[in-house]
Amino acid sequence: MPIALRYFILTLLLCTFIGETSAQRRRKSTLWDGVRVTPRAGANFFFGDLVDKSTTNYSFGVVAEKELSPYLSARVQLMGGSMKGTQIHPIENTMTSRFENIYGDFSVGASFRPIDLAFGYFKQRSFNPYIIGQFGVAYYNADNWYGPSGYIPNSFRHNVSGISPIISGGLGLSYWVSSKINVNIELVGTMPFSDLMDGHENWMYDGPDGQPVVVPTKSYDFYYTATAGVSFLINDSQWKNEPKYNRKAYMKTRNARSYSGNKKNVKSINKKRRRSRR
């Protein structure tokens, strides 16, 4: 396992432990407390080492999250879709090859809400940004064709399929429509530990003397997914000090205190007026 992936997994485990121990619940949590389910759909953008021009294509899936603390949630994601891209000849500026890939990825990780940590957790805060970190596996099934400037022009090259470990991270922004439903957008970058998402690890073209030229490439591919979703809260979390963590209760408490304070101020003013008249 790559050392970067080991450190990433260790960080997620530490965050989960800290979030679980720091959270103070009013009662023992049940399985469905704080669970949200989010269908997602959007586009992906592939940036492989052999792809000069990435064609925007579709991605869709579902995400399930469970709150572990007022600012940290465990996360499971299942996504899939289609990818496309082309390779351009460095001299003739024509297509050397192209690929199409049907893919799917499964990831587990966490989402972190910095505003809730800094300013307090409100279940009905309108806008709430969050940070995403995940690791998992991806399946790819890529078809590859030579283009007009390819080694064997306009011919099918091969099909490549397999499974690769992945690591991903990104940003999200949610907007609560009600206490149970929020709409959100996410931009997540994913790096597979494979160079075959686009169907090949190196590419060739005919040199000036007619001999094939093999072009060395980097080690890994990379892709982004930009998706929108609608989250449904199955069951609310129950944390200690409910007015602190629930915006409705907080607003009622604040209004009650303000009203009480105003009454005291009015009484104080009336007393001063009476004294001045005397």
Image: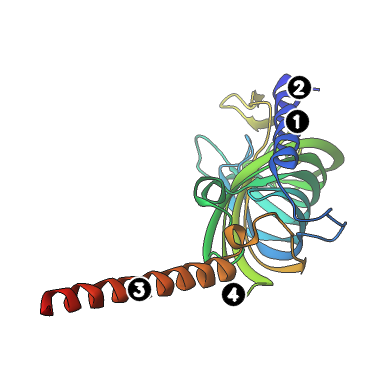
Residue at disc 3, secondary structure: helix
Give the percent coordinates (x, y) of residue 273.
17, 77
Residue type, label 4: Val
Give the percent coordinates (x, y) of residue 90.
52, 35
Task: Give the CA separation, mark 3 to mark 4.
Answer: 33 Å
The answer to whether 264 is drawn above or below residue 168 in the figure is below
Between residue 117 and residue 272, name the one nearer to us. 272
Quadrant where the C terminus sits is bottom left
Q: Which residue is mark 4?
A: 177
2 or 3: tag closer to the N-terminus: 2
Q: Which residue is mark 1?
A: 9
Viewer-nearest of labels 2 and 1? 1
Viewer-nearest of labels 1 and 4? 4
1 or 3: tag closer to the N-terminus: 1
Q: Which residue is mark 2?
A: 2
Residue at disc 1, secondary structure: helix
Q: Residues within 10 Å of mark 2 (few under 14, many from 20)?
A: few
Q: Is residue 99 left or right of residue 113?
A: right
Task: Give the CA separation, mark 2 to mark 4.
Answer: 41 Å
Between residue 62 and residue 92, name the one nearer to us. 62
Task: Give the CA separation, mark 1 to mark 3.
Answer: 53 Å
Give the percent coordinates (x, y) of residue 75.
75, 49
Q: Are marks 2 and 1 in contact (CB under 8 Å)?
A: no
Q: Which residue is mark 3?
A: 262
Q: Residues within 10 Å of mark 3 (few under 14, many from 20)?
A: few
Q: Farthest front residue? A: 278
Q: Are marks 2 and 3 in contact (CB under 8 Å)?
A: no
Task: Give the CA separation, mark 1 to mark 4.
Answer: 33 Å
Between residue 108 and residue 238, name the one nearer to us. 238
Residue type, label 3: Asn
Q: Which mark is residue 118?
A: none
